[in-house]
Image (spheres, rainbow, N blue to C red):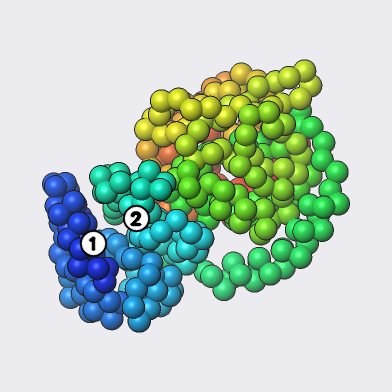
Amino acid sequence: MKKIRLLIVDDSAVFRGIIERGVSADPDIETVAIATDPYEARDKIIEFSPDVVVYDVVMPKMNGIEFIRRLLPQYPIRVIVMGSVSDAALDAMNAGAVDFVAKPNISIGRTKDIFLQDLISKIKIAASANINIVNSHSDSARDSVLHSVRNQSAASNQNKTSSYSKKIIAIGASTGGTEAIFNILNKLPPDLPGIVIVQHIPPEFSRMFAERMNKSTLFSVRVAKTGDFVESGHVLIAPGDMHMRVKRLGSKLRVETFTSDKVNGHCPSADVLFESVAAACGEDAVGVILTGMGDDGARGLLSMKKAGARTIGQDEKTSVVYGMPKVAYEIGAVEKQYPLHKIPKAIIAASQ
């Protein structure tokens, strides 16, 4: 197989060395160039045509987010941004990065080895990402949506009377999922059944992701905790390091979050959520599987379908990585696939 051609961009010689030595241990990755600033990086992109660029979010002359905004319209390429844990992670993906990797930080338990393992994994995922979707992200379009939604959202969340859900909408996603989820929630009315989500995301980003969705959609969005009830107008997102399952309590639905072994290489796992929804809700559920690498969620979605739930998958053309929805479709777990922009309407129809 062809090796993944990597460009490393970081102003720290020490960190450039750590990354180059770390990724060189993987036989599938070849570092073809190194750059110390964004202008050198642009020249190296032209000269070496790398498959993936890893770029420090904090750089002299131009930060990582601005670099992506200027780079992608001219040179379609897959970018992974590195940095400290902050809103920059979500800003970078909003701008068009495939993913974000937190740099080593002992305070959050992130050692050099963990960082390199994560980085290598995400480089491989990025190399297979749909470049047309990655490069189609639009800050200006999204910002105009957020501007119109934020004012409505505060009033809506304050005045809304929530009700316990008999029905439920369960969503599973991985790479590319944060943007896909935003686009879906932004087009859904808040009077739908309660929504539960597993997004493969580092635990340190779960809260920031939930807070951003809470501010930028008409839903009340928060990180789930054991004992939370599933309510109309509310979205519960699984913590980034805990599984989430749904249980029925009389006429109500309640979630439990718990620590356990990874399932399909993930914690939280979409399969864990979907299997619990199949058991607790049967036909009173809608399952949605979105962009992501691997097969997590496919078998759980099949269980939901067999239990009578309606099931929806994202199509290949609009998926950043057509892995999870592909497997789900191939094993018969998906009733119908839709492009991302049609999924909200499909969810509304299936929820009736």
Answer above or below: position of 30 versus 166.
below
The percent position of residue 8, horizontal first and vertical second, equals 23, 64
Query: Which one is nearer the viewer's eye here, 118 or 195?
Result: 118
Figure quadrant of residue 5: bottom left
Amino acid tagged 2: Lys
The percent position of residue 41, horizontal first and vertical second, equals 26, 75
Q: Is label 1 in a helix, a strand or a loop?
A: helix
Amino acid tagged 1: Phe
Q: Which residue is mark 2?
A: 103
> Which residue appears at 15% of the width and 54% of the height?
21
Q: Which residue is mark 1?
A: 15
Q: Mark 2 packing: few (<14 Cα in 10 Å), some, or many (20+)?
A: many
Position of 204 compared to 233: left or right? left
> Which residue appears at 78% of the width and 62% of the height?
152
Query: Which one is nearer the viewer's eye here, 97 or 60?
Result: 60
Residue 290: assigned label? none
Q: Is label 2 in a helix, a strand or a loop?
A: loop
Position of 164 compared to 307: left or right? right
The percent position of residue 221, horizontal first and vertical second, equals 67, 47
Q: Quadrant of the C terminus?
A: top right
